[in-house]
Image (cartoon, rainbow, N blue to C red):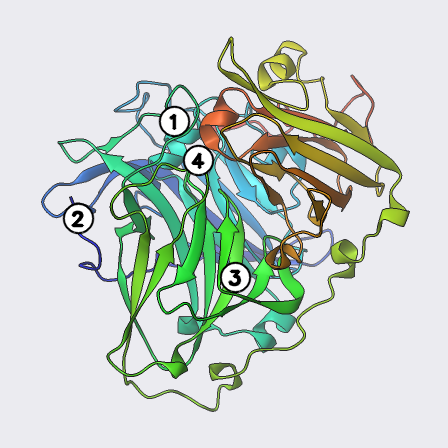
Amino acid sequence: MPRPYRAAFIQPPVLRPYSVGIEPADGAKVENYVVTQMAGTAKILPRLSTPILGYNGIFPGPTIEVERGTKTTLTVKNKLPATHPTHGHVLATSTHLHGSASLPQYDGYASDVTMPGFQKKYYFPNFQPARTLWYHDHGVHYTAQNAYSGLAAQYRIHDPQERGLLPQGEFDVGLTITDAMFAANGAMGYDDNTHSGLWGDVILVNGVPWPVMKVKRRIYRFRVLNASISRSLRLALSTNDAMTMVATDGGLMPAPVTVTSWRHGGAERYEVLIDFSKYKVGQRVELRNLSNKNNVDYDNTNKVMAFDVVGDPVDKSDTTWNTVPTVLAPNTDVMGLTKGMVEQKRYMRVARDDKTNMWTIGGSSWAEVIASGYQKVFAQVAMDSVEEWEIENKSGGWFHPVHIHLVDFKIISRNGKAPMPYEAGPKDVVYVGEGEKVKVLMRFGPHKGRYMVHCHNLPHEDHDMMTQFRVALNANEVDEHDPMTAARPEWDND
């Protein structure tokens, strides 16, 4: 087993476009990228190699960074083995850019899969405000095993406002946090406890167990993604010092919020500023995990990573070195939504059928969607309509991070009270804890078509806690953006 704080912190490489062009229709810049899903090995354990499945054969996959308004294409080549080397299922994949308002056929619809030997070209608009997104596998019924095996990576949209307010470059740091368990031969073990969840005994940050990062005496920005397939986190510093929350899933908050810890469910992204100028050279500060109800914890899952403060010179001409903004971004499109704008209210329960061990959301499952020819929906919504959804968890001993595709939403209440202060920003995943009831507001658009809603505890999603909604289309109406037919994978000739 690896020991905490023995390995150096690393960041995944930034992917470069293979070509850059102009969109004829609107003159927008287009950057073209390609990634290959392939088997690889990772050096996680001290003396053993760990087989993984990764974008370009690494875990996490390469980071993609784009400027707002620059469109991208991402060709995903499935060069994986025909079947998973450990679990045996067919390695059909579907790539979801989580947090992007993509057209339905490029949104990673779970049943829109690409088989080994094929490739699919995805188009991403990148018109949304600056934010931390991530791309990961979304293949129907095997998302958990595929993401757990390594198919996950960060994707970032920048804009001038964010660049002017927050640290950039080496001081803008991605932390993709996962957990894993290992077999005696070094392979990652998998046991989802009859589809209830998997909680590993090793915490990985960017694929490294409990790493140590050297930091200068200045402010750093951390883009924290919980990419664990089940584990939730409650992050805090060993010094109990405050951190400053500046962004949520959908980008900048209206104003920063001071936190000493926060509850962080699967797929949520939070961006925090940590000021290391207050610490002495040589001091070690740990990022710890205080955990939450109904996780499974082990000896060292209370640790995440460590920061060692060094005395390297700090460029004080960069004003972000010691400045925490007092105002960020109003994001009135989302945070300006009010109950007075609501045109429709809906209720969604997340639950488990104890007889079948299957999960349901909004009273149905993905099996029912498949049986309906992909026509059954939880909601049919009008373009630009504002709705209030109430999501309730009566299922007992589980928490559910619920992800609504296409839209950002505003959390307006939790158990009849105000949401957590750190949730006061645009979101696309909401943590629905045991016995909790949350209400969210969202405006639907800008695209027509079918989009998914599901639990991001991925064993729950796979069995079969997914449904969908339809925007501005009637049932069985001709759908030019049908996610199952509009953009089919092609044979990869490479």
Instruction: Specify the amino acid type for callout 1.
Output: Gly
State the residue position of label 3: 271
Q: Residue at x 59, y 19 (%)?
A: 366
Instruction: Specify the amino acid type for callout 4.
Output: Asn
Q: Answer left or right for 298 relative to 178.
A: left
Q: Are marks 4 and 1 in contact (CB under 8 Å)?
A: no
Give the number of the disc on residue 378: none
Give the number of the disc on residue 294: 4
Q: Residue at x 60, y 67 (%)?
A: 257
Q: Which image quarter is the N terminus in?
A: top left
- The answer to which image quadrant residue 368 occupies is top right
The alpha-carbon separation of the residues under discs 4 and 2 comes to 25 Å
Q: Are marks 4 and 2 in contact (CB under 8 Å)?
A: no
Q: Residue at x 39, y 39 (%)?
A: 151
Q: Answer left or right for 351 relative to 185.
A: right
**CA neighbours of label 1 inside 10 A, class few (<14), some (14 to 19), many (20+):** some
The alpha-carbon separation of the residues under discs 3 and 4 comes to 25 Å
The alpha-carbon separation of the residues under discs 4 and 1 comes to 40 Å
Residue 471 visible? The answer is: no
**Image location (x, y in percent) of residue 417:** 71, 49
Q: How many marks?
A: 4
In the structure shown, which secondary structural element does the residue marked by tag 1 occupy?
loop
**Image location (x, y in percent) of residue 141:** 47, 21
State the residue position of label 1: 117
Which comes before the other along the chain, label 4 or label 2? 2
**CA neighbours of label 3 inside 10 A, class few (<14), some (14 to 19), many (20+):** many
Front position among marks 4 and 1: 4
In the rendered image, the vertical position of residue 338 relative to residue 146, given as above or below:
below
- The answer to which image quadrant residue 342 occupies is top right
Which comes before the other along the chain, label 3 or label 4? 3
State the residue position of label 2: 2
- In the rendered image, the residue lying farthest to the bottom is 317
